[in-house]
Image (cartoon, rainbow, N blue to C red):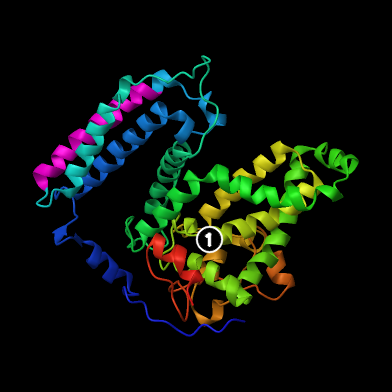
Amino acid sequence: MIEKNSQTHSDGADSSDEVRQFSRVDGESVRFGTGWISGVAAIALSGAGLLVVLCIRFPSIFTMSVLREYYPIPIVRALLYVVITSGFLFGILSLVLRRRKVLGTTAIVFALFAGLLGGAQIQLPIAPDGSAPAQSLLSVDWFVLNLMFWCALFIPLERWFALRAEQPVFRHGWRTDLSYFFASTLAVQWVAILTMKPAQILFSWVIDESWRTSVANQPLALQVLEILLVTDFVQYWIHRAFHRIPLLWRFHAIHHSAERMDWLAGSRLHIVDILLTRGCTYMPLFILGFADLALLTYGVIVTLQATFVHANLRFTFGPLRYFLVTPQFHHWHHSDQSEAIDKNFAIHLPIWDWMFGSYHLPDRRWPDHYGVQGERPPEGFLKQLLWPFKR
């Protein structure tokens, strides 16, 4: 096991301290009536409106071609009008209420820029041959859709069923995690290509088409179950290797550097960690030849579970926690307490940890704190991106 000496939490391990620290930003209160809430809402609304306008104006750069045909443009335009207008009005309210004008000014600039680009009346560009552009470079639309979905789902859940009710939505490290979320969703198409290509190049010579056909013709539910078993077994050992091999640990330590757990914390993953894990996991799936629909279904399942097990939720699921990976199980994996180091590597099924001696799930206890022991990565997306490469 890699030696990791105990750490001190420089930002304060006591969550009540975090609440007191968070009660003021830039010397001003963030409570209701101070312009903080209206300012944040204004930036979220006008920023989303600007991104959607950019997607419509430059679809070949900012949108996924597989999604374009499903967008109801008249409804999108109506929503754009509401979103941009609301962001502008909330920005004005924040300017009135708050001494520092950064939030309101930023939101108003976003809203005005969106309006200058066409706002709710923007038209779809047409290619010279009369068709809509097919290629795409960045998935801004995928980022917007994902952020809206996860926020709408998990922010209320984490308020109603919080494990740590005192933990604010904008907790320590949220900017770093949002940066990872933005980068991973923005480049989702490129990440998919980079994780699939190695398997297609290295193992095309071992492909048995008759075998792949028989696998793909199985019932969908059976294929999904088989994919879960195969990927979980492979990822268990990849995950364990990232903890045991010092070079790999430097990349995986980025994920463990999150000291607060919620739905956004699971986004904190170094690109090398993502490519190695997903690339190695895809190899047996490519060789076996599962149907595209089964792979897509598994992708939805793994995305939901990966987000859910990091969430700030107090659900323990009773006896089911011995058969499925739950938030309690994975929270222990993220703890920097000595009893939890190098435990709970499974992604879906704890059976692998039972079998190979890495299982740790106290009946009614949750970890007291999270993070890494020993040398800690710096906070900030760019700093963490470079940190594993430094001696």
Along the horizontal axis of the image, is 88 left or right of 151?
Answer: left
* Secondary structure beneath label 1: helix
Q: Is residue 362 visible?
A: no
Residue 288, position as x, y percentages in the image: 81, 48
Q: Which residue is drawn at 86% across and 50% down?
A: 206
Q: What stretch is highlighted in magenta?
A: 76-97
Question: Please, which residue is most extreme toward the right here?
Answer: 210
In the image shown, does 87 or 225 lie closer to the viewer?
87
Answer left or right for 121 relative to 295. Answer: left
Q: Is 43 placed above or below 78 here?
A: below
For disc 1, the neighbor class at 10 Å (few under 14, some 14 to 19, many from 20) is many
* Residue 176: quarter of image: bottom left
Residue 218, quarter of the rendered image: top right
How many dots with numbers? 1
Q: Is residue 122 above or below residue 355?
A: above
Look at the image and tell me whether residue 298 can be seen: yes
Tell me what residue is drawn at x 66 percent, y 45 percent. Answer: 298
Magenta span dominant secondary structure = helix
Q: x, y (%) of residue 6? A: 45, 84
Identity of the residue furthest to the top in this view: 130
Q: Residue 77: within the magenta?
A: yes
* Residue 247 on image: x %, y %: 59, 74
- Residue 367: x %, y % from top left: 47, 72
Q: Which residue is drawn at 52% across and 53% down?
A: 308
Question: Which residue position is annotated with label 1?
Answer: 327
State which quadrant residue 193 falls in: top right
Q: Is residue 314 above or below residue 120?
A: below
